[in-house]
Image: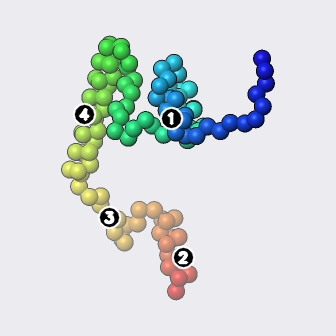
Amino acid sequence: MERKVGSSTLTAKEVKAALEKSTTLTAEEEKALRMRHGAGAPSKSAPLPRAAGANAELADELLVIEMQLMKAMRARTAAKASKAPAAVPTREAPANAAKDKIVRALRAKKK
């Protein structure tokens, strides 16, 4: 094999074009190349790749998990919206004696 003499420079556009044509790279390899050369995603409006690929069973399982997570998130946000505002501690009953002592010291220092 002959040794190459000289240098060559790859641009982000060249890497991006080559990655769009490539079908043999894994997701990790493609990600590493894009990060190394600063080549962005093919298009901002391009759909995201599906994690399940062509596996229908895995796609179904992922859909069920996604639906469960969405249901839990909706329940949590509804619970937060309906929750009453937290009670404010009064001056007569401080929540923490150490905290009250620090606040008093800071107020005295401020004066």
Q: Nearer the viewer, residue 73 or 83?
A: 73
> Looking at the picture, which amino acid does disc 2 mark?
Ala
Q: Which residue is mark 2?
A: 105
User: In the shown orientation, is residue 68 left or right of residue 51?
Assistant: left
**Residue contact at pointers 2 and 3, CB within 8 angstroms:** no
The location of residue 97, given as percent across then percent down, is: 48, 65
User: In the shown orientation, is residue 25 left or right of residue 79?
Assistant: right
The location of residue 27, given as percent across then percent down, is: 50, 25
Is residue 101 positioned above or below 20 on the image?
below
- In 3D space, how far apart are the residues under numbered discs 2 and 3 (Cα atoms)? 21 Å
> Looking at the picture, which amino acid does disc 1 mark?
Lys
**Residue contact at pointers 1 and 3, CB within 8 angstroms:** no
SS class of the residue under badge 4? helix
Is residue 95 positioned above or below 54 on the image?
below
User: In the shown orientation, is residue 37 left or right of residue 40?
Assistant: right
The location of residue 99, given as percent across then percent down, is: 49, 65
Q: In the image, which disc is placed on residue 16?
A: 1
Q: In the image, which disc is placed on residue 24?
A: none
> Which circle's residue, 4 or 1, is located before the other in the chain?
1
Q: Which residue is mark 4?
A: 71
> Looking at the picture, which amino acid does disc 3 mark?
Val
Look at 56% across and 81% down and name the residue there: 109
Look at 25% across and 33% down and name the residue there: 71
Label 2 Cα crowd, 10 Å radius (few <14 / some 14-19 / many 20+): few
Q: Which residue is mark 3?
A: 88
Look at 58% across and 40% down and name the residue there: 11
Q: Report which quarter residue 50 is drawn in.
A: top left
- In 3D space, how far apart are the residues under numbered discs 4 and 2 (Cα atoms)? 48 Å
> Which circle's residue, 4 or 2, is located before the other in the chain?
4
